[in-house]
Image: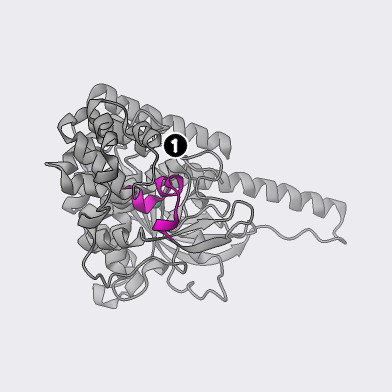
Amino acid sequence: MKNLRYVLMALVLVSVFCFQATKASALEAKFDFYYQSIEEVKTINEPIEENDSLWTKFKKTVKKGTNAVKRLWEKGVTRNFAPGEGEKTWYSEGDKNIAYTVKRTKVTSEAELLSAMGVKSESELNDGQKALLAVFRKSKSQAIADEAKIGYIPTVKVLLSDTTGFDDKSKYPNVTKDFWPYSSGLAINMSSNNYNYPGGDKDAESTLVHEYAHCLDATFKEFKNPYGLDGSHYGNEITGKRAAFVEAWAEYNEMIASEDEAKAILKRSESLCEESKTVAGSYTWNIKQEDCTADQLMRSEAHLAKLLYRLTMETDNGKEKVYKAFTSTRLNVFRDMSTFVKKFIKQNPGDTEVVCKIVDEVFLGKMTDEEFLDYVGKNDVTKAYVENRGKNTEDENADIQIESSDTEVTTSSEKITVENSSGNPFSDD
Ligand SMILES: [Zn+2]
């Protein structure tokens, strides 16, 4: 799998390089949509029993090996490059002995999507299916068109996975994780069961904006456990610093597309969580941001998203500046937020002081002077800022307090994304 990932990484890098090198004109958002519904869950590997004959054991072992290769191919190549139509196999990540038969249909219009879903009008759909339809519609929105201006993948594949009929967790315990929304950088998967509740369509739209933002980003997350031992992350989790930057970029795009998302993500930064370094899935919850170290805050995706958002809101033409600094650091695949901030300042020297103020406030003034200068880069203005730092951070975060918000806060019960189960070329499971 590693080798396959490196091939995918190389392909994406070549795409980024070609895009940057030729200064190609902005790409239109172009998606190939495939609707797929589960038809059956099938057992692909029989357990090897003690009293099996040697020949039977041999056959079962060979079959297991063959299925492992097919799984890698299906996840790494088929989904990303050639999903195809008709009956297809979707391999389970949660249980290596099962796979799903899905019926896949390419759709180019709402009418085709409804027809593939087997209905005449959307009133016949359940909430999860409505969310898939909303994703299709959202792909034609201004928010996506704005993101597409810095795209470098000519066509992103979007798989709309309809799990209807297989949502009973007691019967099909792996379906949720096996079809969890993700972006591989080249393809996006969305599933109905994640949004099968009233209002799920809005959340699904926001997820599309998020996952598509990942398709614009060639940053390599940490090679080992970027999201910790469980391989997935919460929106208020403290992770690896490059992983936090990657997620912050995606969340930032959600924030500028939706005020509600912006409020929710700003609120999320108030209380964080962190996974144990030794026990997968074991978390410390409700870590108040005030109790975090500077290092923890610099690895908090919610704080980094807040930083990008504040740069947009508090500088003139902030969004253009953020996008420009993002694209012009894109060939640095090991970038983190500090790489971005330094570029932002270099490109917008007149904003240096306000950037310093925002960085200092977002990280609650917790960096030492040395850490601060290391983060924003040294020049006359940043050095002068540091001289007066004590005075500057007294009103930390004062101007971004959100009025009493009743927005849902992401808490321990809600995982945001499972990035690592996807064959994401930029992840390590
Ligand atoms: Zn993400």
Whether 294 is among the magenta residues is yes
Q: Residue at x 53, y 61 (%)?
A: 284
Look at the image and tell me whether residue 317 can be seen: yes
Q: Position of residue 421 (x, y in %)?
A: 52, 52
Q: Is residue 379 above or below residue 196?
A: above
Q: For this rendering, which residue is in front, 389 or 411?
A: 389
Q: Is residue 291 above or below residue 299?
A: below
Can you say which quadrant of the picture contains the N terminus?
Answer: top right
Q: Residue furthest top?
A: 21
Residue beneath disc 1:
220
- Left-right relation of 113 to 170: left
Q: Residue at x 47, y 49 (%)?
A: 239
Q: Position of residue 218 (x, y in %)?
A: 38, 36
Q: For this rendering, which residue is in front, 128 or 91?
A: 128
Asked which quadrant contains residue 45, the reply is: bottom right
Q: Residue furthest left?
A: 316
Q: Residue at x 28, y 40 (%)?
A: 389
Q: Position of residue 170 (x, y in %)?
A: 57, 76
Asked which quadrant contains residue 113, the reply is: bottom left
Range covered by the magenta-colored residues: 288-304
Colouring used for the render: one colour
Look at the image and tell me whether residue 212 can be seen: no
Q: Secondary structure at mark 1?
A: loop
Q: What predominant SS class does the magenta segment belong to?
A: helix
Q: For this rendering, which residue is in front, 225 or 357?
A: 357
Q: Amino acid at mark 1?
A: Phe
Q: Is residue 246 above or below residue 118?
A: above
Q: Is residue 268 above or below residue 165?
A: above
Asked which quadrant contains residue 124, the reply is: bottom left
